[in-house]
Image (spheres, helix red, strand yellow):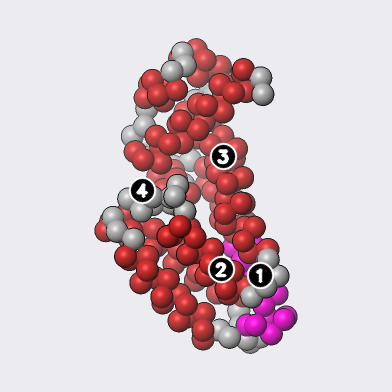
Amino acid sequence: MKKSEATRLNILQKAFELIYTKGYQTTSVDEIIATTQVTKGAFYYHFKTKDEMGLAIINELMIPNFKNNFIQPLQNDENPLDNIYNMMYHLLIDNEFLKVEYGCPASNFTQEMAPWNIEFTKALNELSKQWENAMILSIEKGMENGTIKTNLNAKGIAIFVLSGYWGIRNLGKLENNKSIYISYLQHLKLYFNTLK
């Protein structure tokens, strides 16, 4: 990796960490520069604006990470409901990066930026749609292989599960305690049992 590419990646990674813990709106370019220890000129060489950097965080850091943690677990051909539950358990309980007190980075960006910036809305909607479509495909496979009732609406199930995840992340931030995740997971399992 060239020095210029390494500098750019360093800015994105450090800025992402700051934004995840403090929020996008309250994180200044000066804080990012101080944390990354690059010059102001170096920052503006790579990104014309803070919003350009924010979009790069979504497209270059969050989307690849999202695919690894939110999409790939659903591509296993075994029982889709087990795959979805195990993925949710991992994201809420086992994942060491996603902290209960800070919630979900994609959800945080959506709440902070989607109402104000159409480019953020497009990028975040693409991220959400990829997850929704992967879940729909997984559920439809389950209907085909007989592990899920065939008279159900795969999209409706996916939207219900996705909205539950975004919501429980926000409740977790308020309570700052993973015990609320346990309650969500228990009831998610009960719901999945009704789909078999």
For marks 3 and 1, give the CA distance. Answer: 25 Å
Residue extent of the magenta highlight: 132-148
Q: Quadrant of the N terminus?
A: top right
For marks 1 and 2, give the CA distance. Answer: 9 Å
Q: Which residue is drawn at the image coordinates 56% and 16% (left, top)?
A: 45
Kind of residue at disc 1: Ser
| Circle 1 SS class | helix
Q: Which residue is drawn at the image coordinates 51% and 84% (left, top)?
A: 193
Kindly identify which residue carries mark 4.
Answer: 102
Checking the image for residue 84, the label placed there is 2
The residue lying toward the viewer, choosing from 173 and 82, is 82
The magenta stretch spans residue 164: no
Residue 81: quadrant of the picture: bottom right
Ranked by sequence position, the earlier of labels 2 and 3 is 3
Kind of residue at disc 3: Leu
The magenta stretch spans residue 142: yes
Mark 2, Cα crowd under 10 Å, few <14 / some 14-19 / many 20+, is many
Q: Which residue is drawn at the image coordinates 66% and 19% (left, top)?
A: 2
Mark 1 near mark 2, Cβ–Cβ under 8 Å? yes
| Circle 2 SS class | helix
Kind of residue at disc 2: Ile
